[in-house]
Amino acid sequence: MKKIIYADNAATTKLDKNAFEAMKTYLLDEYGNPSQPYSFSRKPKKTLQTARQIIAKCINAEPGEIYFTSGGTESDNWAIKGVNFIFPEKKVTITSQIEHHAILNACKDIEKLGYPVVYLSVEKSGKVNVEEFEEFITDSTGLVSIMMANNEIGTIQDICRLSKIAHKHGALFHTDAVQAIGHIHIDVKELGVDLLSASAHKFGGPKGIGFLYIKSGINISPLISGGSQEFSLRAGTENVAAIVGMAEALNQAVICREKIEFQLRKMEKIFLQILKDNNIDFIQNGDLYESLPGLINISIRNANGEMILHRLDLMGYIISTGSACDGNEDKVSHVIEAIRVDNNYKEGTIRISFGKYNDVSDAEELALAIVKILKQY
Ligand code: PLP
């Protein structure tokens, strides 16, 4: 097989080996339905409890506050719809223009049902405009949903500050932490969040599994009705193997986080320096100080991001032009528009997201490959 350098870890990550090992038993041997009363289901049932405890500990929550879902999209939809549907009167939801489509389209859904939504603008760094937030928030705001870290440009928001403002007005605070969890420190108590979305495949877990943290005492309506799984709030037989894989992957990610971050920051520096040394005319998007480790978003003057992506693909390098979920649309992403990237640069936007399986030589090789493509332009 041709050597591939995978640098699209914000789209998805390779399954962690320990997570894979932990999952195997629950696929082949311990496949009992955890809801059944017989002894064959005892181990899967106990395993679910343990996974809930491990995950809770990783974010300083209680096990009873972790609700397993099918991933980030479901967790986001549940937070937006589940909270709004509980209000007897239609309260206002405040979110930002740079959220993932899982949030933006869930908000569009509730708008169609008559729930008002405000979409806050962001600064050029991708940080939410706090003055605008304070202007729009009132006592009729029911929910505020602001992502912890952006999937395209990596900007990390000041969730502590934003959640305090929300609570001052009696609103609940949700954060989409899909890109953040496992990569930056998360403590739900320090952050002051009421709900938090996560997805396993962004931190070395399997695809199709995630969770929603719901702070104890928060009232939320179920998104999926049926049996009594997940404390009667999210029905459906649990994907035990995937849950085990998610818990193991998150635990590994949290244990190794600082060491991996150190490596990723080194790769970022080397990658950018090579572009600069070769006089590539580009701007770096996102907040230069508070940004996800290993995620680099650049816009290259008079270039075409799609063309760079495909040329790199032929050479064995995997990167992205924007959000993976936008991959079928050949247009400048809503995030790049929201941060007002200059017209001469925005078409030339690419996202590189290194992960724990990359090393410094990957960063060097990839940067040189981009230089080569641009010099042939
Ligand atoms: N939220 C963010 C910020 C994301 O980056 C993604 C995936 O790219 C999602 C939500 C959706 O997560 P999932 O792929 O688990 O549905």
Image (spheres, rainbow, N blue to C red):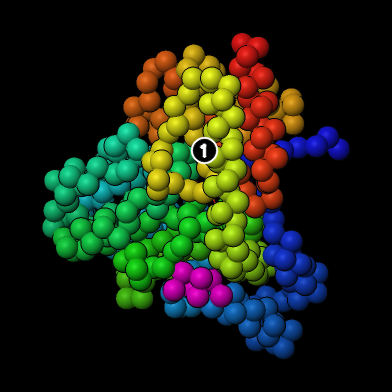
The residue at 73%/70% (across/down) is: 22
> Is the residue 320 above or below the residue 95 in the image?
above
**Residue 56 colored magenta?**
yes
Q: Position of residue 303 (x, y in %)?
A: 53, 16
The residue at 68%/78% (across/down) is: 44
Q: Residues within 10 Å of mark 1 (few under 14, many from 20)?
A: many
**Residue 339 colored magenta?**
no
Quadrant of the image occupied by residue 250: bottom right
- Left or right, residue 204 beside residue 337: right
User: Which image quadrant: the N terminus?
Assistant: top right
**Looking at numbered disc 1 in the image, what kind of residue is underneath it?**
Ile
Q: Position of residue 4 (x, y in %)?
A: 76, 37
The residue at 49%/34% (across/down) is: 297
Residue 157 vs residue 110, the one in the foreground? 157
The span picked out in magenta is 54-60
User: Which image quadrant: the C terminus?
Assistant: top right
Q: Which residue is mark 1?
A: 296
Magenta span dominant secondary structure: helix
Q: Is residue 226 visible?
A: no
